[in-house]
Amino acid sequence: MNLSRRLFTLHSWFGLLTGMFLLLLGLSGSVLVFRHELDHLANQRLLTVSPTGPSVPPGTLDRCYQTIVRRYPRLDGIAWLNPDAGPTDAYNFRLYLNDERLFTYDLGLISLDPYTGAILREGKSADFTPSFIEWLLQFHFSFQLGVPGAALTALFGLTMLVSLLTGAIIYRKMIGKVLLFSVRINRKNWRTISSDLHRIVGVWSLLLNAVIFFTGFWMNLFAFKDKSWQTETVSTRPNTLMAISADSLYHKALQQMPDLQPTYVYLPTQPERKFRVNGPLIDQWVLWGTSNLVNLDQQTGQVTLVRRLSELPIGEQLEATFFPLHVGNYGGWPVKLLYVLIGLTPGLLSITGFLLWWRRARKPKRPVATVRVTGKPARPIRTRA
C-alpha cells in the first residue's frame, strides 16, 4: 500500500471514529462565540438592575465576596467575570467548587445586584440553571465529564489536527484550484456533491480549524497532569477569608497598573492563592490576551507581582494569544461571525466524509479471473462488474 493510500485510510478512520464528537464540539463552539451576548439576551430581565444612586456603592465587591463565602464555606476560589459591568448590569461571579468526584467539573455561577446585594441567579454549571450557556461552556471543554472529559476533548483536538494534516496532503493538488475558485460543486448526484463539498470546505477552513483545535488542545493540557486528577477527589479546606477588603485590594491593583482594563478578578478563599486582576492594556489589541496582571497578598495587602505582556518571553507572549484565537473575540462582529461559520465545518466535514466512506464501502469489488495461455503462467485479468 503506497503512502497516499495509507494516509487516506488514516484520514477516513480518524474522521469516522471522532466525527460525532467533533460535530458536537464545533456546534457548541459556534454558539459560545456569542456566549456573553446570548446569556445577556436570554436573561436580560433577570440581569438588568436598577441603579439606586449615581454610582455603585463603596464596598460592593467586598459585600459580594462576603455573601458568597457565607453561602459556600468550602471554595477553591471566586472569580469576578465582568469587572467592566455597566451601571445597570448585575455582577457575575464564577465559583470554583469541589464535590470530590472525578467525573464532574465543579464550576458554578452566581449573579448579584451590586446595589442591593440580592442574589439574582445561582447554580452549578453542570445544570441548565442558572444558565444554559454556562452548561454549554462546561460541555464544550469537558463533555460534562470532569477532568477525564477535558482530557478527552484535548485528544479529539489532536485527532482533528491529524485529519486536517492528512487531508491537506491527500488533496494537496486541489488546494490551489479551490483557492483560485477553479473548483465548482458538481450537482450530478449526492456522491459528487459530498465529494466536492468535502474538498472545498476542507481547504477554506483548513488554517482556522487548525488554529482553533490546536489552541483548544493546548488549553486542556492541564487535564494530563497528575495534580489535576488528584485535587478533584480531595476535599476542599474551609475558606480562609481575605483580611483586607476586596475593594481596597482592587483599587490598589489598578493604582499599580493604571492602564490596565480589568476583565477578570480572582478573589482567593485559600491561603496559598493570591488576589489577582487580569486584563488587556488601554489601546492594546485583545488578541494579546490578558497576561497583564497584578497580584496582591490578601492578608497583608503587599503587591507580590506586576506583570506586563511586553515583558514576557516571546514564547509566553505567543501563548497569551491562544485563548483569543480559540474564541474569536479579537476582531469584533466580523471575526465572530467567521468563527460561527468555521465552527460548523467540522460537522459538515464529518458528514461529507462519512458519505464518501459509505460510497466506497458499498461499491462492489471487481472480481478477478484467471486465463491460462499455453506455454505461459496464468495471469489475472479483471472483468467488468
Image (tube, rainbow, N blue to C red):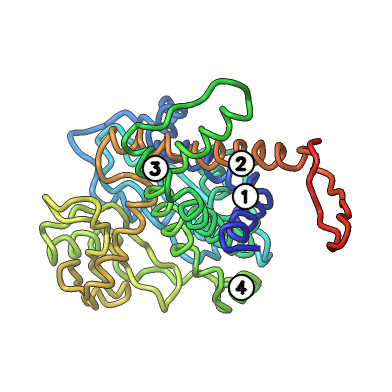
Local packing at callout 1 (Cα closer than 10 Å; few below 14, some 14-19, many 20+) is many
Say above or below: 377 vs 45: below
Q: CA–CA distance between discs 4 and 3?
A: 36 Å
Say above or below: 222 vs 192: below
Residue wearing tag 2: 353
Residue wearing tag 1: 15
Q: CA–CA distance between discs 2 and 4?
A: 35 Å
The reply to whether discs 2 and 4 touch (Cβ–Cβ < 8 Å) is: no
Q: CA–CA distance between discs 2 and 3?
A: 53 Å
Local packing at callout 3 (Cα closer than 10 Å; few below 14, some 14-19, many 20+) is some
Q: For marks 2 and 4, give the one nearer the viewer.
A: 2
What residue is shown at x 62% (from left), y 37% (from top)?
351
In the depicted view, which residue is nearer to us: 208 or 241? 208
Residue wearing tag 4: 229
What residue is shown at x 51% (from left), y 33% (from top)?
197
Question: Does any portion of residue 171 appear in the rendered image?
Answer: yes
Q: Could you tell whether 346 is left or right of 364 in the image?
A: left
Q: Earlier in the sequence, mark 2 or mark 4?
A: 4
Q: For marks 2 and 3, give the one nearer the viewer.
A: 2
**The N terminus lies in quadrant:** bottom right
Question: Does any portion of residue 70 appear in the rendered image?
Answer: no
The reply to whether discs 1 and 2 touch (Cβ–Cβ < 8 Å) is: yes
Q: Could you tell whether 366 is left or right of 292 in the image?
A: right
In the depicted view, which residue is nearer to us: 354 or 30? 354
Q: Secondary structure at mark 3?
A: loop
